[in-house]
Image: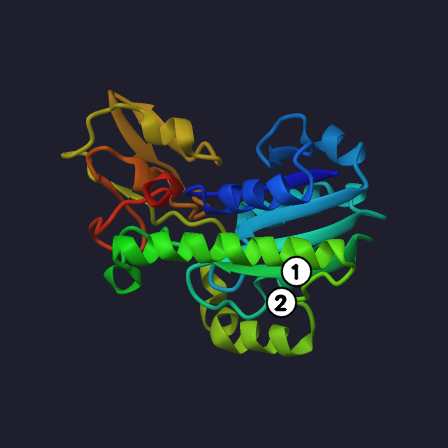
Amino acid sequence: MIGIYFSGTGNSRYALETFMQEYDNLAELVSIEDKDIAYKIEANREIIFCYPVQYSNIPLILGDFIVENKALWKGKKIFVIATMALFSGDGAGILARLLHKYGADIIGGLHLKMPDSIADVKALKRPLDKNIKLVEQAKTKISLAVGNIKEGNPPQEGIGLLYRMAGLFGQRLYFINKTKKYTDKLKINTKECIGCGKCAGLCPMENITMSNGLAKAQDKCTMCYRCINSCPKQAITLLGKKVIDQGTIEKYL
């Protein structure tokens, strides 16, 4: 067994770590960014997959990863965990359908509400105590899900037609262009940037480069919000015009 994840600010990584501690604490956890991941997938038949939903859709970096490795999914037994700030409808289901297209056997899905990572949109912000409570509730839900799986009754959240309709008409239909291609909208305030290079080191797309001692954004952002939540000068924005509240999973533990 192996646990695979893509994570922006750590929510999905933490959710998978928590899940695997109860389900199989000997299983390896690996990011889709790991250079040896194809070999590790080939060596394991059972997979727990965890990722963050974007507008009821799959982050483009993850979708590309699934397609680029399409030959690896045939015959794999996969359980999908989707983390989200708002109800996504079929968060687990949309990834499950893509994996099933390439021959995976989907055994179920789990939805976990977690702290929002979109640091530059005020409407989505919650107080710190509510975010801490969300993480605690997610841990409880994970424990229940693991128990159900071990009893042969895995949860089916996000799986099925009704969930699919909820995801489509709840968000995906209206925001399809947000995740259809990588975005060139990442903005770096050069007056605030101190050239520390932290954002460039964190970016899973290598979309940020350093030029003349300052960070520079390119046109291939996958909206993971790592750089925005980690910039020490709050100099990076994407959807909003200024950073409201930064946060990675460590803030809520």
Extreme right residue here?
Answer: 75
Quadrant in the picture for the C terminus: top left
Is 83 rendered above or below residue 56?
above
Q: Residue at x 59, y 67 (%)?
A: 90
Q: Amino acid at mark 1?
A: Gly
Label 2 to label 1: alpha-carbon separation: 6 Å
Q: Which of the pair 107/105 is nearer the observer?
A: 107
- Disc 2 marks a residue whose amino acid type is Gly
Q: Which residue, given by chain and number where applicable, does mark 1 sit on?
A: 109
Q: Which mark is residue 158?
A: 2
- Residue 32 lies in quadrant: top right
The spot of residue 168 in percent (x, y) is: 56, 74
Q: Position of residue 241 (x, y in %)?
A: 21, 53
Tell me where residue 223 appears, x and y as whole percent. Answer: 42, 48
Element class at badge 2:
loop
Mark seen at residue 71: none
> Going 69% across and 32% down the picture, which residue do you hit?
26
Give yes or no for contact between labels 2 and 1 (Cβ–Cβ under 8 Å).
yes
- Front-lying residue, 130 or 64: 130
Vertical order, 52 against 154 (above or below): above
Direction from residue 227 to residue 25 in the image, left or right: right
Q: Is residue 6 visible?
A: no
Q: Is residue 145 at all visible to an observer of this figure?
A: yes
